[in-house]
Amino acid sequence: MAGLFIILLGGGIFLSFQHHSAQSHSRRQTARVVATTPAITAIMAKLGVKLVAVPTTTQALPHQYRKLPRVGNHVSINWDNLLAVKPDIVYVDSELADEYQTKLKEQKITMQALNLQTYPQLLKTITYLGKVYGKQAAAKKLTAQLKLKPVQRKQRPRVLILMGMPGGSFLAMNGQSYLGELVEKAGGKIVGADPHSLYTSPNSEKIAEAAPQIVIRLAHAMPAEVEAAFKTAFKADPYNQLTAVKEQHVYDVKAPVFSPTANLQVKKAYAQIKEWIDQVE
């Protein structure tokens, strides 16, 4: 009799757990979700997650979201629009979380920071969101589509990546940064950057000594202004003496294909980087 009671009790606990899990899944499926970056929005579209608002951006958004309210971006958050859609959860890039955290906490709105700093983190984020919203099959398919094949080369061309900032300053990106990681995976060697810090102010002597054969210049924000600053800087030492400049292997890139953080354009970015490296191998 006691054994029967234990079995019934165990069954009751199991049924209760199943019911709770079903309720939790149902709540997630009906939650009012906001994405605050184009990268996050694109992932949600591929997974088939319903959104109630999207970021304000010049980039093309997935067609199913184009008529949704725009909530600004981390530079200029449109709090009126964001709060008006009564979100249950707001997804932000982990690097931008501070811009949203305090206000959302005051409004008792859940914020979830997603790490898109690297290619592996992109894949982990997709898998995580697939699990949260019951879209595991779509997430598995998407991560498989984004798989990158590393390239082995006898000679690894030297590559300098510079990210331009509004105001004319530059940052050198190392091999652990998202783009640096793609360069290394494509068989290139990142030079001219501090190996212990993702982004550092470029050192003219180190860059000249490294003699990069390829320079990738990323205009992360205000591309017209940043690209003009790059052109001016590259008319002077040490840049005008670089092998990459003399052999015309300097490439200006910008969003959405190229970005300091990972997104679903990763295969296009990787293919382009491989092509550039192939030319100087």
Image (cartoon, grey):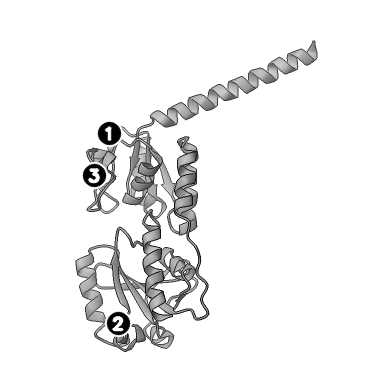
* Residue occupied by mark 3: 78
Q: Which image quadrant is residue 206 in?
A: bottom left
Question: Mark 1 belongs to which amino acid?
Answer: Val
Q: Residues within 10 Å of mark 3 (few under 14, many from 20)?
A: some
Q: Gap in Å between the C-alphas at discs 3 and 2?
A: 43 Å
* Residue occupied by mark 2: 248
Return the disc, 3 or 2, that comes first in the chain's sequence. 3
Task: Tell which of 34 and 107 is nearer to you.
Answer: 34
Task: Tell which of 269 and 29 is nearer to you.
Answer: 269
Question: Mark 2 belongs to which amino acid?
Answer: Gln
* Residue occupied by mark 1: 85
Picture coordinates of residue 280, whole percent (x, y):
40, 80
Return the disc, 3 or 1, that comes first in the chain's sequence. 3
- Where disc 1 sits, the SS reads loop
Question: Mark 3 belongs to which amino acid?
Answer: Asn
* Mark 3 vs 1: CB contact within 8 A: no
Picture coordinates of residue 71, whole percent (x, y):
25, 43
- Where disc 2 sits, the SS reads loop
Q: Is residue 66 left or right of residue 184?
A: left
